[in-house]
Image (tube, helix red, strand yellow):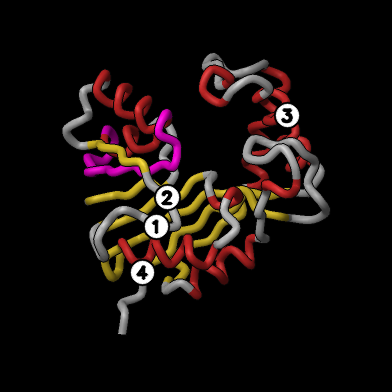
Amino acid sequence: MSVLDVGSGVGGPARFLEETYGCQVTGVDLSEPFVEAARYLTARTGQDGKVSFETGSALALPFEDGRFDAALLQHVAMNITDRPLLYREIRRVLKPGGKFATFDVVLNGGDPLYPVPWAKTPGESFLLTAEATCEAIEAAGFDTVVRRDDTAIAKAWFAELRTSGPPPLNLGVVMGQGFAELTTNLGRNLMQGRLGILTAVFEAVPVS
């Protein structure tokens, strides 16, 4: 399968998909330094023949119509204000019947506490509820295959993190100084019911 990873960062999920399932994966990210890092790491893992990365906007994907069998969007949508255009672009580059998987933070109840990993202030954050997110995706030309609330799983992960300490990988090296505080705030928002986690898979409806 040919898979598009939208907002691919330094390429971890793209490399995982290729290694685990043998997919041909293309990542696209707005940040040129992230793309350069992704290419370097992919060359080091010997996967540059099946995993590639390009610089580009999720709102103007640099690919032809109907190119991919599947698309992945992970922790990206909360940075984007024009959700209808985002989901239309993903639909455009998918084949009819192609799958679109999303895993993102959503509004749950109450105003979020800032700063968080994707935004320092409310003006930089463009969250939707799970319901509004799914409605926007369906309006872009998708049918829902499966939709799941994974908030409880995320809460359990943060609870374990508090007792076991930080993970071995220092994400601050990649995400910048202060990332630990931002992650802590995300955990507080989840624990207090302000935010939730949506996991969902959609199928591209054939264009009539």
| Residue 184: image tag | 3
Q: x, y percentage for residue 194?
A: 78, 49
* Residue at the spot of label 2: 57
Q: x, y percentage for residue 176?
A: 59, 22
* Residue at the spot of label 1: 60
Amino acid of disc 2: Ser
**Camera-nearest residue between 92 and 186:** 92
- Using the numbered discs, state the Cα–Cα distance from disc 4 to disc 1 in whole angstroms: 18 Å
User: Tags 4 and 3 in contact by the CB under 8 Å rule?
Assistant: no
Q: Which of pointers 3 and 2 indicates the residue nearer the eye?
A: 2
Quarter-of-image position of residue 168: top right
Q: x, y percentage for residue 125?
A: 67, 49
Q: Is residue 59 left or right of residue 130?
A: left
Residue at left 74%, top 36%? Answer: 115
Q: Is residue 75 magenta?
A: no
- Using the numbered discs, state the Cα–Cα distance from disc 4 to disc 2 in whole angstroms: 21 Å
Amino acid of disc 1: Ala
Q: Which residues are magenta?
A: 19-33
- Using the numbered discs, state the Cα–Cα distance from disc 1 to disc 2 in whole angstroms: 5 Å
User: Tags 1 and 2 in contact by the CB under 8 Å rule?
Assistant: yes
* Residue at the spot of label 4: 204
**Camera-nearest residue between 172 and 195:** 172
N-terminal-most mark, 3 or 1: 1
Amino acid of disc 3: Thr
**Which of the image's four quarters has the C terminus?**
bottom left
**Camera-nearest residue between 7 and 50:** 7
Q: Which of pointers 4 and 2 indicates the residue nearer the eye?
A: 2
Quarter-of-image position of residue 88: bottom left
